[in-house]
Amino acid sequence: MHAGAIDDAERALAPVRAFGPPALDSFAPVAYAAFQRSLDMPPGRRNWWTAEYLDNLTDGAIDAIASLSTQLPAGPAQILIREVLAPHRTGGTYLNWAAEAGADRVRAASGPTTSASRA
């Protein structure tokens, strides 16, 4: 993904495209809303997005995520890692996915400096 002028993106991609014929070249201009929709799961799949920030991807965080892999069913699957990462997360989050969590969650994700400046 390149966020900026199309000419700049074409210049940035030129060396990659010059390397050799790609198996697939799907780089093309896309409206932001269309890109956001590309992350949606197919209809009928229950899906809820959230994001948590970690200061570091520690061995403990990796072990917590890996421990869930034994619970995956065959076929397409997702794992909910938020709760197992609770001891490792900073409290910050990507706010596009936090609005439904309520104002307190948004304030907590913004941190004390940002929240205090809006008080």
Image (cartoon, rainbow, N blue to C red):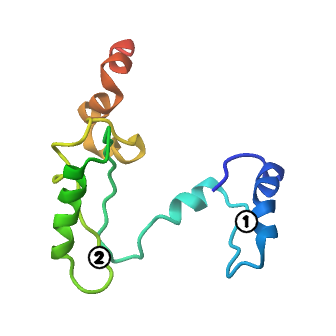
Question: Dividing the picture into quarters, in which one does residue 91 lie?
Answer: top left
Q: Residue at the location (77% across, 79% down)?
A: 21
User: Dot 2: what SS?
Assistant: loop
Left or right placement of residue 61 versus residue 7 in this view: left
Q: Nearer the viewer, residue 29 or 88?
A: 88
Residue occupying image coordinates x 31% and y 66%: 47
Furthest residue in direction bottom, as rendered: 74
**Quarter of the image holding residue 14?**
bottom right
Residue type, mark 2 in image = Ala
In the rendering, at what x and y percent does residue 20 appear? 78, 76
Give the image location of residue 31, x and y in percent: 66, 57
Image coords of residue 50 (percent x, y): 32, 51
Circle 1 Cα neighbour tier, 10 Å, few/some/many (<14 / 14–19 / ≥20): few
Residue 95, relative to residue 33: is it above or below?
above
In the picture shown, does residue 66 fall above or below 49? Answer: below
Please, what is the three-letter code of the amino acid marked with disc 1?
Ala
The front one of 21 and 59 is: 59
* Cα–Cα span, label 1 and label 2: 29 Å
Number of the label disc, if any, that sits on residue 20: none
Tell me residue 48's x, y (percent): 30, 60
Q: Is 97 positioned to the left or the right of 78 in the image? A: right
Q: Earlier in the sequence, mark 1 or mark 2?
A: 1
How many dots with numbers? 2
Examine the rendered structure and indicate whether residue 92 appears above or below residue 13: above
Specify few, some or many for label 2: CA neighbours under 10 Å numbering under 14, 14-19, or 20 or more.
few
Residue to which mark 1 is pinned: 28
Q: Which quadrant of the rendered structure holds the N terminus?
A: bottom right
Residue at 80% x, 57% y is 10
Q: Which residue is mark 2?
A: 77
- Residue 73 in the image: above or below residue 7: below
Q: Is residue 27 left or right of residue 80?
A: right
